[in-house]
Image (cartoon, rainbow, N blue to C red):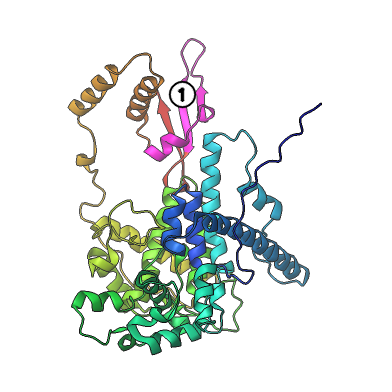
Amino acid sequence: MPVPEKEPVRRQRAAIAPDRLLGPHHFAFYRGWLEGVDLARLADRYLDPGLDLRVARATVDWIAEELARGVRRLATRSKAAAGEGGTPQRRWSESAWHALFHPPAGETATARIARRKRQQRALEELQPLLAARPAPDDAVAGWFTPAIAQRLTAAGMTTLAMLQAGIAQGGARWFQRVDRIGAHTARRIEAWLAEFAAELGAIPAAALVPRRSATAAELASLRPPAAMVAPLESLLLPPALDGRQGHNRANAGSEQRIAAQNDLMAIHAWLGVHPPIGGHTWRAYRTQAERFLLWAVFARGKALSDLTVEDCSAYLAFLADPQPAAQWVGPRGTPRYRFDWRPFEGPLSPGSVRQAYTIVKSLCAWLVSAQYLRYNPFALLPKPKAAGQGRIKVARSFTDAQWQFLRGFAAGLPPDDARTARMQFLLRFAYATGLRISEQAQVTVGDLRQQDLSADQRGMWTLSFIGKGTRAREVHVP
């Protein structure tokens, strides 16, 4: 008698509120998950502290479904705009989106890394189009996890406006009126509301000061934090500073050539026409545009499309000494999804200030050509001078003694290890060609060409590739 097969064990999926809204914190949470960051850490950072991992996993699935649903909506709108003779936005193909997040079996490591990069770029482009902004009339169930939302609703705080009113009325210990919400979760809720103060209104600081005498540390912990700088993909601009009404915006009657409605979307449009070939040039563009926009909003208190020539001159001075350092400077290599990420690693050298000037001037010139801005405020500023411009920095090159040490070290590595062969080849290849690390990682055997000099003489080998600034380069290879 045949033994019946057992039913496969299915993981129970936690329920997600049907009226949940997709916010910027969900994009940051999903990006971290794609990069392989521990799910518990991500949930604690972007969702709720101590969140059940079943809920965190269900949130990942929910975000994926919402993104796919949003892609379908964008594709429909794009087709409708094309049918009506309008200018369609980028066409989002549902099949291409599915292939991006559902790889074929047997995917190689190189293909997986390339696909991860495409995923991150796609999320950066989609966030301004799909991420919702909180409004006072929104239900708390739309912005908080079901457990937190149910406890707030049971206490009569069903909307964000009612939640803020309850906090203002209850003071620093307002959470004691809510079942099973402690001080730590309350501080997280207050910080989230403060982050969206431009949309929801600020909670009076006096309401969060305890009625008893408190230490300075306690007062600092209870005060809602000011708006913080954030990467472009996680940034929400206050409506008053998003550039919709900037004095440098092109006239309403002009034919704007991009669909951007605010400064952040305009920067995304600019980055979108610069494919990240090689990665470094595109990342430099993103870094400089990001710093410029963040400085305008958080340091100058202006929209990017409100900046004048004097503002841009002050920005170049700021690059040489970004202060206050606690707000602008962070450790090198901090992941972009981390709360302690900062746009600078320290003051920029004169050469780096010069490069920043070139990039942001190019950004503004492109926005003028797109008829988003009326004029380029950097056009009237002279290009900063770099000390020792045009000189090769000898200190950044290896000496003959250092090269001999590297060769000797590589020669002493285990001979039967494949890693040894790769190391020895890379040292010889780098010494012979002078390619950058990123260029070495891209070139293939197919980029080699042999030129016959004569019938009795060996041909010369050349290597053709795309180098810095997407320029075609060619070097001789011995």
Residue 411 image offset from top left, x and y in percent = 28, 17
Instruction: Report the side of 38 relative to 55 (left or right).
Output: left
Is residue 245 among what the camera can see?
no
In the image, 246 versus 6, the foreground residue is 6
Residue 175 image offset from top left, x and y in percent = 40, 78
The quadrant of the image that shows the C terminus is top left
In the image, 430 versus 51, the foreground residue is 51
Determine if the magenta segment contains residue 168. no
10 Å crowding of disc 1: few (<14), some (14-19), many (20+): some
Which range of residues does the magenta coloring cover? 436-465
Is residue 473 among what the camera can see?
yes
Residue labelled with disc 1: 461
Residue drawn at (65%, 65%) of the image:
89
Residue drawn at (56%, 84%) of the image:
137
Residue 308 image offset from top left, x and y in percent = 36, 79
> In the rendered image, which quarter is residue 413 located in?
top left
Residue 36 image offset from top left, x and y in percent = 47, 47
In the image, 41 versus 388, the foreground residue is 41
Determine if the magenta segment contains residue 442. yes
Asked which secondary structure carries label 1, the reply is: strand
Instruction: Report the side of 250 relative to 347 (left or right).
Output: right
Q: Which amino acid type corresponds to the residue marked 1 in the rendered image?
A: Trp
In the image, 356 versus 417, the foreground residue is 417
Instruction: Report the side of 50 relative to 206 (left or right).
Output: right
